[in-house]
Amino acid sequence: MHNHAENMKHITKQTARNFCLYEKGSVTMQDMVYIDDAGIVRSCCFHETIEEQRLEHPNIELWFFTDVMQEIDKAQEATFKKSPVEITEDRFTEMLEVLPPHNWHRETGSESFKMSEMTCGNYTEIFCRIGEKFYELCDDVHKTHIEIVEMCKAI
């Protein structure tokens, strides 16, 4: 569980690299931190104190980096994950030709590909054809063709 006051007790010059500034629910962390020669916790990019950072980001807190990575994963899923929707063949073809497709997979009766640019983190737009129907979704880039087909068949 995250506890800003408790984290402040445990941060030292040696452990500062394990901490960062984060606003719960955000899809990105604000900044890593360090402890200056006066013993003050500061952001690495702007060299601001936590209080100075709070002038622009009132809910920012000091977090363990590993906890932030888990929180970011949750926030990205909530923000970017989209269930499959049926689309036109024209939309499917247009997106296939926009960028080189990532992980283009073709089987008898179905195919899927992912956009080679990520929307955020591991999330990208995914396109699927099953027979004569076409679908679009946004999900983890590591989804397999079989998982994508099953998700699309479920709608």
Image (cartoon, grey):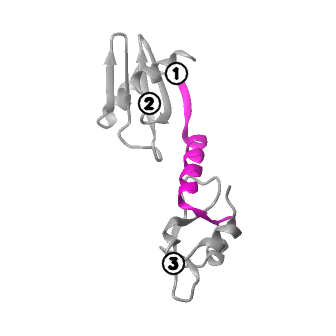
Task: Please state the extent of the stretch shown in magenta in the rendering.
Answer: 58-85
Image quadrant occupied by the C terminus:
top right
Image quadrant occupied by the N terminus:
bottom right
Which one is earlier in the sequence, the residue at label 3 or at label 1? 3
Which residue is labeled 1 in the image? 151
Up-down relation of residue 118 to residue 107 (above or below): below
Residue at horizontal 47 percent and vertical 47 percent from the top: 120
Label 1 with label 2: CB-CB less than 8 Å: yes
Return the x and y of residue 45 as percentages of the image width and height: 47, 73
User: 117 left or right of 81?
Assistant: left
Question: Does the magenta run of residues contain 84?
Answer: yes
Which residue is labeled 3 in the image? 13
Q: Amino acid at mark 3?
A: Lys
Residue at horizontal 53 percent and vertical 56 percent from the top: 66
Residue 3 quadrant: bottom right
Q: Amino acid at mark 1?
A: Met
Q: Secondary structure at mark 2?
A: loop
Marks 1/2: CA distance? Answer: 10 Å
Q: Secondary structure at mark 1?
A: helix
Residue closer to the observer: 11 or 29: 11
Return the x and y of residue 119 as percentages of the image width and height: 46, 44
Marks 2/3: CA distance? Answer: 40 Å
**Number of dots carrying numbers:** 3
Which residue is labeled 2 in the image? 143
Marks 3/1: CA distance? Answer: 48 Å
User: 88 left or right of 70?
Assistant: left
- Judged by depth in the image, the label closer to the viewer, 3 or 1, is 3
Residue at horizontal 60 percent and vertical 54 percent from the top: 26
Return the x and y of residue 129 as percentages of the image width and height: 41, 18
